[in-house]
Image (cartoon, rainbow, N blue to C red):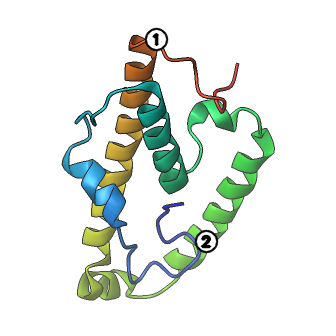
Amino acid sequence: MVSGDTTGLGISGAETPPALKAIAAAPYALSSPRDCATLAREIDEIDALLGPDVDALAADPKGGLDRAANQAIGSAVRGAIPYRWVLRWMTQAGKMDRELRQAVLAGTARRGYLKGVRQGIGCPPPASTGP
């Protein structure tokens, strides 16, 4: 699953996976053939990259709280490093983080788009979709 540097010191930046870069280049392109199985497989691949969609998170309400607490602690530690911004500038971590955020946004948009296309052509909802 793709995520930013939430456990490290945030000095080096996170690398964007090639599959996510490809999605960011054309988030609304439709693959061929456009059938239920192909669309479901692509949605599953995006889920593997980004983690579960919001409809699947409702099944595990505690998981989100634990993740938020860990991110808050990591943020506090990273914020205490003197001259961290200089190191991030030298390693281009900010640029890498922006690229990753934009690719994750494109991946999230693509997943929603593909779910809409699946619904539009009459496919059954994916098994991971909540109530």
Distance of label 1 from label 2 (alpha carbons): 44 Å
The location of residue 105, given as percent across then percent down, is 36, 45
The location of residue 20, given as percent across then percent down, is 34, 56
Q: Quadrant of residue 38?
A: top left
Rendered image: mark on residue 106: none
User: Height in image: 17 above or below 25?
Assistant: below
In the image: residue 15, left or right of residue 3: left
Identify the residue under disc 2: 74
Mark 2 falls on what kind of element? helix
**Residue type (three-letter) at the residue carrying disc 2:** Gly
Q: Residue at x 28, y 86 (%)?
A: 91
In the image: residue 104, left or right of residue 9: left
Mark 1 falls on what kind of element? loop
For the C terminus, the image quarter is top right
Identify the residue under disc 1: 122
Observer-nearest of 120 and 16: 120
**Residue type (three-letter) at the residue carrying disc 1:** Gly
The location of residue 93, given as percent across then percent down, is 32, 77
Observer-nearest of 84 and 90: 90
Q: Residue at x 32, y 53 (%)?
A: 103
The location of residue 49, given as percent across then percent down, is 48, 55
Q: Residue at x 52, y 77 (%)?
A: 78
User: Height in image: 39 above or below 44?
Assistant: above
In the image: residue 91, left or right of residue 107: left
Q: Residue at x 59, y 27 (%)?
A: 126
How many C-alpha atoms fall within 10 Å of the one at disc 2: few (<14), some, or many (≥20)?
some
